[in-house]
Every structure is written in structure tokens, then in C-alpha cells.
Amino acid sequence: MVGVVDAAERRVEALLRALGVQRVAARRRALRAVEFGAVGASGAVVNAVVFVLAPVAYLLAGALAFAGGTAWTFALNWTVTYDRPSRSLSRALARYASVYAVGFVVYSVVLAGGVELLHWPGLFANVTAIGVAGTVNFAGSELFALRP
């Protein structure tokens, strides 16, 4: 598994160099953003599956889905994106959970606004909320929770 991740990182780094990303962002941060996005995409799948399978009202389904996706992404971000930072696991989890609590508020507002105000279908509102909250979560993870 480690060899696969290392090989993927090398390919992404080469692509980022070819695109000239280092002129806009530090190479390592750009790579983390790509990895965070890939982890987030897998977390979005976990979130969507839980959301669809939860036989409860959409806000409760959203809460369950968000919790499942958060647990999934912490495990992957800790091991893949941030290569197990030196800080303790429990402290990192607490900080990550606090960032994601803010992300959950953002997620809930977007989800409820999409369904109640914009009359979007629940799943579409959910996926949109994941994208908006994911941006907040990357910034919080990068600057606070899992800061390298």
C-alpha cells in the first residue's frame, strides 16, 4: 500500500510541476491539497452511501453521513495526506474534530438551504454541502488540525 501511495504522489508531483503550480502554491501544499481532495472524494462516497441508506429525516441522515465521512477521512488524511504527523493521535483527532464541527455547521446550512430554500433534491443538496464544507475542512486541517 505504501508503495502505491508513493508512486501516486510522484506522478501527482510531476503533473503539478508540469502545470507550474509551484508558482502559485508550495509544492508540498499543492500535493496535500490533491491528496486531501482524493481522500475527501472517498469520504463523499461514504457520506452519500450513509445518507441514502439512513432511514431517517434528511437532517439526521446528514448528521450520520457527515460523522461517518469524517471518521473515514481522518483515518486516511492522518496516514496518507499528512504521513502521520508527529503530534499525538488523540490531539490530532480532537483538533480535526473541532475543524470538522465548524465544517458540519457549514454543511448543515448549505444542506438545509438547498432543500428548504432552493428546493433541491436531497442528494444534490447533500453533494453540494459536501463540496462547500470540504473547502472549509481543508483550510482548517492545513492551518490547524494536521498542520505539518
Image: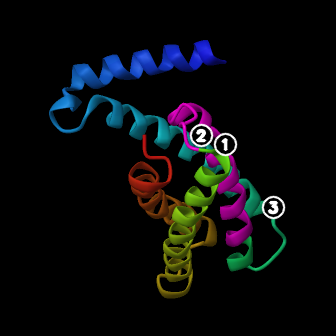
Hey, what amino acid is under mark 1? Ala
- Confirm whether residue 46 shows in the render: yes
Q: Where is residue 146 shown, x and y percent of the image? A: 49, 47
Q: Where is residue 136 shown, x and y percent of the image? A: 42, 61
N-terminal-most mark, 2 or 3: 3
Q: Is residue 66 left or right of residue 104?
A: right
Q: Residue 75, labelled with which disc?
A: 1
Residue at x 25% of width, y 21% of height: 17
Residues drawn in magenta? 62-87
In terms of secondary structure, where does tag 1 sit?
Answer: helix
Circles 1, 3 touching at the beta carbon (< 8 Å):
no
Decide: few, some or many residues near mark 3? Use Cα within 10 Å; few <14, some 14-19, many ≥20. Answer: few
Residue at x 22% of width, y 26% of height: 19
Residue at x 56% of width, y 59% of height: 95
The question of residue 73 being in magenta is answered with yes
Q: Is residue 72 left or right of residue 17?
A: right
Q: Where is residue 7 shown, x and y percent of the image? A: 50, 13
Distance Cα–Cα, label 2 vs label 1: 5 Å
- Confirm whether residue 44 shows in the render: no
Circles 2, 1 touching at the beta carbon (< 8 Å):
yes
The residue tagged 3 is 53
N-terminal-most mark, 1 or 3: 3
Compared to 91, does 26 lie above or below? above
User: How many numbered discs, if any?
Assistant: 3
Q: Where is residue 62 shown, x and y percent of the image? A: 67, 70
Hey, what amino acid is under mark 2? Trp
Q: Quadrant of residue 34?
A: top left
In terms of secondary structure, where does tag 2 sit?
Answer: helix
Decide: few, some or many residues near mark 1? Use Cα within 10 Å; few <14, some 14-19, many ≥20. Answer: some
Q: Residue 78, labelled with which disc?
A: 2
Q: Residue furthest bottom?
A: 117
Residue at x 66% of width, y 42% of height: 75
